[in-house]
Image (spheres, grey):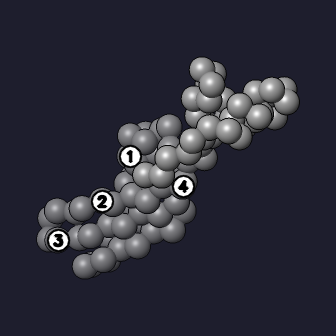
Amino acid sequence: MKVNVIGDTIPQEEIDAYIAYGKKKYSNREITEMTVKVDGEFVDLQYSFADVPFDRIRRITGYLVGTLDRFNNGKRAEEHDRVKHTV
């Protein structure tokens, strides 16, 4: 994890405490970077997270599908003949 400290220097123990706080608060996400902005007695913490992969799911011919791999030729032809709208 990359750590940026802006505004002043702080001890490594304090940085480690902010890292532990972030890992506890955002336990379901991977933190890639942390920025600590020091302003006197106050600090602002900013965390950057790793991208979360996702699968695209579409509703095609009444079915929720990610890919057309499991469609037979009839369903593939039905999907091919559909009118596709742009956003």
Spatial CA span between label 4 and label 3? 27 Å
* Residue topped by disc 2: 45
Residue 31 seen in the current view: no
Determine crowd level at label 1: few under 14, some 14-19, many 20+ residues with C-alpha closer than 10 A: few
Q: Say what secondary structure mark 3 lies in.
A: strand
Q: Position of residue 21 (x, y in %)?
A: 38, 46
Spatial CA span between label 3 and label 2? 11 Å
**Which of the 4 quarters of the picture holds residue 68?**
top right
Q: Say what secondary structure mark 2 lies in.
A: strand
Which amino acid lies under the numbered mark 4 shown in the image of this protein? Ala
Residue 9 seen in the current view: yes
As drawn, the label of residue 21 is: 1
**Which of the 4 quarters of the picture holds residue 26?**
top left
Spatial CA span between label 3 and label 1? 19 Å
Determine crowd level at label 4: few under 14, some 14-19, many 20+ residues with C-alpha closer than 10 A: few
Determine crowd level at label 2: few under 14, some 14-19, many 20+ residues with C-alpha closer than 10 A: some
Residue lying at 77% horizontally and 33% vertically, measured from the top left: 76
Q: Position of residue 23 (x, y in %)?
A: 46, 45
**In this picture, residue 55 sits left or right of residue 1:** right
User: Of the residues under marks 3 and 1, which one precedes in the sequence?
Assistant: 1
Mark 1 and mark 2 in contact? Answer it, CB < 8 Å.
yes
The one nearer the camera, 13 or 27, is 27
Q: Is residue 26 above or below residue 40?
A: above
Spatial CA span between label 4 and label 1? 17 Å
* Residue topped by disc 3: 39
* Residue topped by disc 4: 50
